[in-house]
Amino acid sequence: MAEGRYYRDQNAWRDLQKFLPERLQLSDQDAPEEDFWDWNGHTIHLDRYRNPAAKARVVLHHGVGTNGRQMSLILGAPLSKLGFETVAIDNLGYGMTSVARRTNPTYDDWVQVVVDFLAAENARDPKPTVLYGLSAGGMLTYHVAAAAPKEAVRGIVGMTFLDQRDQQVRDQTAHDIVTARVGIPAMALVAGSPIGRMRYSMRLASKMSALANDRGAMKVFNKDKTSAGNSMSIAFLDSYLNYAPAIEPGDFDRCPVLLTQPGQDRWTPRHLSTPVLSKIQKVEVRETTLENAGHFPLEDPGLQQMVGQVAAFVTEVTA
């Protein structure tokens, strides 16, 4: 396993948490335990709040403009204080995860990382598990639940559920209409060639400027090469934009679904989740609106509502 990189040596998350309510700001004493897991030669970074006595585990997923520590700040730490075990994953290419040399991971790998991680966690300490995902992480929870054994996931929570195969979703979440209508098809033509290894700024690929509603926070995000300031390969972007789930929404029967839609989301408003959620009929779909909250929520009362709603959902579906 490669030598791990640590958030304890990074200032970006410390700078970002200054924009959060004081109760959510972490010190070195109550920051998550930093752990590592080897997956196919990659060193996957994990933010853990262990609790052997917890009745449920919540696995947290970032999107394409965030990382695991940012998930720990807004939800992992608060849920741990309520008695849940939480673990936030830095997926391939983000956060403190180290990608193996001479590899070019795709979104398919993102899904498989989590499927395999759930199996490893269950072998280590069996607990009923719920998945939470912010932004693109919301749809990742769905893709994982569709691909994993049915018993592996008791429920999924998403801040949004985006099917990037839908043209309206592409048009409204891409950086601009030219990227959505011309750039994305062009990526598909070269993704399998050596050009597919070229890296593309996520700030140019997506509407990253709408990640947070606070300008000061956006400056912190954009400078952070482990989150919003990151770049990913063309092959990854193509696979993300065209991923087909193991079970399409009309046939999804794995577990209940909760949408926690930020009320002031300028990137992915509620209607962009409709192509997915409207088709899910075989399991319960719930939703709640987080008042005053942006896409990455920094604001109360939305943050308080999110923790309360997720905690209640996890308690119910894992009982």
Image: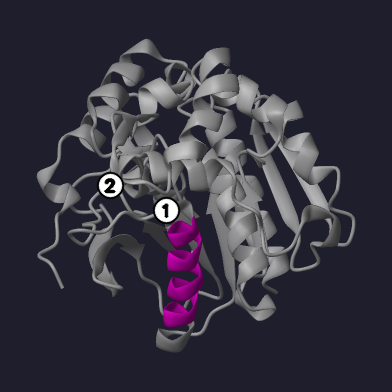
Name which quarter of the figure residue 110 lies in: bottom left
Residue 95, numbered label: 2
Magenta stretch, main secondary structure, is helix
Query: CA gap, disc 1 to disc 2?
Result: 16 Å
Q: Residues within 10 Å of mark 2 (few under 14, many from 20)?
A: many
Residue designated by label 1: 106
Give the amino acid at mark 2: Gly
SS class, disc 1: loop
Q: Residue furthest right?
A: 281
Give residue 270's position: percent from left, percent from top: 72, 28
Identified at 79% across, 44% down, the residue is: 277
Crowding at dot 1, Cα within 10 Å, few <14 / some 14-19 / many 20+, comes out as many
- Is residue 237 shown left or right of residue 17? right
Q: Residue at x 29, y 36 (%)?
A: 199
Q: Quadrant of residue 242?
A: top right
Q: Residue at x 53, y 30 (%)?
A: 184
Q: Is residue 160 above or below residue 205?
A: below
Q: Residue 213, relative to residue 319: is it above or below?
A: above
Residue 37 placement (x, y as % from top left) = 28, 71
In the figure, is residue 156 to the left or right of 32? Answer: right
Classify mark 2: helix, strand or loop: loop
Give the quadrant of the N terminus.
bottom left
- The region drawn magenta spans 108-121
- Mark 1 vs 2: CB contact within 8 A: no
Lateral position of residue 268 relative to residue 288, left or right: left
Does residue 110 show up magenta in the picture? yes
Between tags 1 and 2, which lies in front? 1
- Asked whether, in this view, residue 1 is left or right of residue 227, the answer is left
Where in the figure is residue 157, as x and y percent of width and height?
63, 51
How is the protein colored in the picture? one colour
